[in-house]
Amino acid sequence: MALAEVTDSALSLGKDSLTQGATIEGYYNGAETVPTKKHGDRLIHSFTTREGEVITVWGSAQLDRRLKNVRPHQFTRVTYLGTSPSANGQDMHTVRVETDKDDIDPATRIKTDEIPF
């Protein structure tokens, strides 16, 4: 048996491995609200890859808004497009969010042949 360290750090848009053009693909698990000292409450979004790895990423205004439209356990791809000026002139992180409504995480499907009635 081989043990591996478990960490609790979430990826950040524009940092870590999420540079412009990077993608995250996996089944969307949902989001958790986390209080921060600098930015108040923020969301951390969670995805499970097809290989079973859990990836978490800090939310941004655009990412949070777009993922509100994704149902949990749908296969989702998030592509980081970089930054662009917002309406007030500040840089904002931009993302493309794509989902396959027919690709639901097999681990969460109810197996009808196992229902006792």
Image: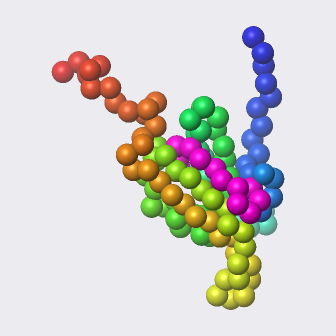
Quarter of the image where one finds residue 8:
top right
Q: Is residue 107 above or below residue 28?
A: above
50, 45: nearer the viewer: 50
Tally of marks: 0
Q: Is residue 86 above or below residue 102?
A: below
Q: Quadrant of residue 14?
A: bottom right
Work out whether residue 18 can be spotted. Answer: yes
Magenta run includes residue 24: yes
Residue 86: percent from the left, percent from the top? 67, 83
Magenta-highlighted residues = 18-30
State the residue lying farthest toward the left: 117
Residue at position x 59%, y 47% from top? 25
State the image coordinates of residue 17 (x, y, percent, origin top left): 78, 51
* Magenta span: chief secondary structure: strand
Task: Return the x and y of residue 93 as percentages of the image width and height.
Answer: 69, 70
Residue sitting nearer the eye, 78 or 62: 78
